[in-house]
């Protein structure tokens, strides 16, 4: 018999499993609102035009080789990524106290940052929002940190539980790590206001809590790269230290290229240099060095003013389409007289709407309407189109009036 015969069948990933179930459904009206990937009005995946251009440029350049990148990845990509998230005029960059390493998209950046903290930071507890992206607790537990939650979402208002957040962070042991969603909180779509961010910053700095930003949606929330980076820049502007995990999956549509970056903002250039040397010791035994293609695409786009401008327009168009889907769904429910207050659909921001539908309603919608989403009632607005909004609105109406 096999030495693995004792293994039990593991459950599907709660998010990716939605797509597995969707793929098995033969219904022509099926709709996948589970996965966090952008779709066009026609329901098709989108490769950005600037990405096509950058790839063409890379192919035409016969001097390009495919040897290993250094452990830290593509150095130009790292510099440009730090500028993109912290701002071109960031004093921290000018003072050389930021170290940036290319990682395997947002997930890899979180994992490398988590392992670095578990090895070298004095506090091993990380606080994550309640609720959060399902992968967060697993990433940080396996990185060697102990995971606790802080209150974030208030189901009764479908908004921020700001009081609870302040209480929980206020009660966290000094020095604890706090994971912050830079914008477009996943899964709730609820972000603090700038004034609330300022209060969070003051509280965290006064208690020496370590900010670890997860920036998976820069530009996707508001349509502006700078606006979406504002909370991070507020924390960097006070001179304190922080970590930032960046992903280019959504904002450049580079999902499968697995391209992202981890930046650690330090107090001095000297410390940043030593931090980088230790990051290399985390990365080398994990995957040796990161892939070259995705980072090269990003570097081509970020270094060229024309391509960069073209990218911001394409990004804005994606964000705008999502915002327009919010309006259309809200209007469709209003037109049907669906009971309840659905204004959170237009108030929430980013790729997801946290509908407030319960697991029973979700499974009803899947069974009767072939609409797929995670059981917490999170729907991807990016997977909707003008054509599919009525079908979704019908199903929500039926689910809540049944
Ligand atoms: N953080 C959050 C909050 C996310 O929603 C995602 C993508 N679903 C990620 C990180 C990382 O995604 P990726 O590894 O594809 O960049």
Image: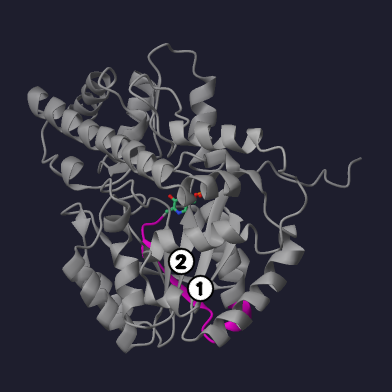
Residue situated in front as seen by the camera: 21 or 106: 106
Quarter in which the C terminus is drawn: top left
The relative height of residue 59 versus residue 174 in the rendered view (above or below) is above
Residue at 46% x, 27% y: name it: 45
Is 140 covered by the magenta stretch? no
The relative height of residue 229 versus residue 402 in the rendered view (above or below) is below
C-beta proximity under 8 Å, tags 1 and 2 = yes
Q: Which mark is residue 128?
A: none
Quarter assignment of residue 384: top left
In the displayed image of the protein, which residue is found farthest to the right?
1
Residue situated in front as seen by the camera: 336 or 282: 282
- Total labels drawn: 2
Other residues around mark 2 within 10 Å, as few (<14) / some (14–19) / many (≥20): many
Ranked by sequence position, the earlier of labels 1 and 2 is: 2
Let me know if residue 114 appears in the view: yes
Coordinates of residue 69 in the picture (x, y in percent)? 71, 56
Q: Give the secondary structure at mark 1.
A: strand
Q: Give the secondary structure at mark 2.
A: strand
State whether label 1 is within 8 Å of ligand 1.
no
Coordinates of residue 288 in the picture (x, y in percent)? 75, 60
Coordinates of residue 101 in the picture (x, y in percent)? 59, 64
220 left or right, relative to 198? right
- The span picked out in magenta is 118-132
Residue at 61% x, 70% y: name it: 115
Q: Which residue is mark 1?
A: 264
The relative height of residue 172 versus residue 13 in the rendered view (above or below) is below
Residue at 22% x, 19% y: name it: 390
Q: Which residue is mark 2?
A: 244
Q: How is the image coloured?
A: one colour
The relative height of residue 17 versus residue 192 in the rendered view (above or below) is above
Let me know if residue 258 appears in the view: no
Residue situated in front as seen by the camera: 182 or 13: 182
């Amino acid at each position: 018999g096999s030495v693995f015969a004792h293994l039990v069948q593991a459950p599907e990933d709660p998010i990716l499993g939605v797509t597995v179930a969707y793929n098995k459904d033969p219904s022509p009206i099926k709709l996948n609102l589970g996965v966090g990937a952008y779709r066009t009005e026609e329901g098709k995946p989108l490769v950005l035009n600037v990405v096509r251009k950058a790839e063409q440029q890379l192919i035409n350049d016969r001097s390009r080789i495919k040897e290993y990148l250094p452990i830290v990845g593509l150095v130009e990509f790292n510099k440009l990524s730090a500028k993109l998230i912290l701002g071109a005029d960031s004093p921290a960059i000018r003072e050389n106290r930021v170290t940036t390493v290319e990682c395997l998209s947002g997930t890899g950046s979180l994992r490398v940052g988590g392992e670095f903290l578990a090895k070298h930071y004095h506090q091993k507890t990380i606080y994550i929002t309640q609720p959060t992206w399902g992968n967060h607790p697993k990433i940080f537990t396996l990185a060697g940190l102990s995971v606790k939650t802080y209150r974030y979402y208030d189901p009764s208002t479908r908004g921020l539980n700001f009081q609870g957040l302040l209480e929980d962070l206020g009660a966290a042991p000094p020095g604890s790590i706090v994971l912050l969603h830079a914008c477009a909180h996943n899964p709730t779509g609820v972000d603090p206001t700038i004034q609330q961010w300022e209060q969070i910053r003051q509280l965290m700095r006064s208690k020496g809590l370590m900010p670890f930003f997860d920036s998976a949606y820069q530009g996707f929330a508001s349509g502006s790269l700078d606006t979406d980076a504002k909370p991070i820049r507020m924390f960097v502007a006070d001179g304190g230290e922080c970590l930032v995990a960046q992903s280019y999956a959504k904002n450049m549509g580079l999902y499968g290229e697995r391209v992202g970056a981890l930046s650690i903002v330090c107090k001095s250039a000297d410390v940043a240099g030593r931090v980088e040397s230790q990051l290399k010791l985390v990365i080398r035994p994990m995957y040796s060095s990161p892939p070259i293609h995705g980072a090269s695409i990003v570097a081509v786009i970020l270094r060229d003013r024309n391509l960069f401008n073209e990218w911001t327009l394409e990004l804005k168009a994606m964000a705008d389409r999502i915002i327009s889907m919010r309006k259309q769904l809200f209007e469709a429910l209003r037109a049907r007289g669906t009971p309840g207050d659905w204004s959170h659909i237009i108030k929430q921001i980013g790729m997801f709407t946290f509908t407030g539908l319960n697991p029973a309603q979700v499974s009803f919608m899947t069974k009767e309407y072939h609409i797929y989403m995670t059981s917490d009632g999170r729907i991807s607005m990016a997977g909707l189109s003008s054509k599919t909004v009525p079908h979704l609105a019908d199903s929500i109406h039926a689910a809540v009036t049944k």
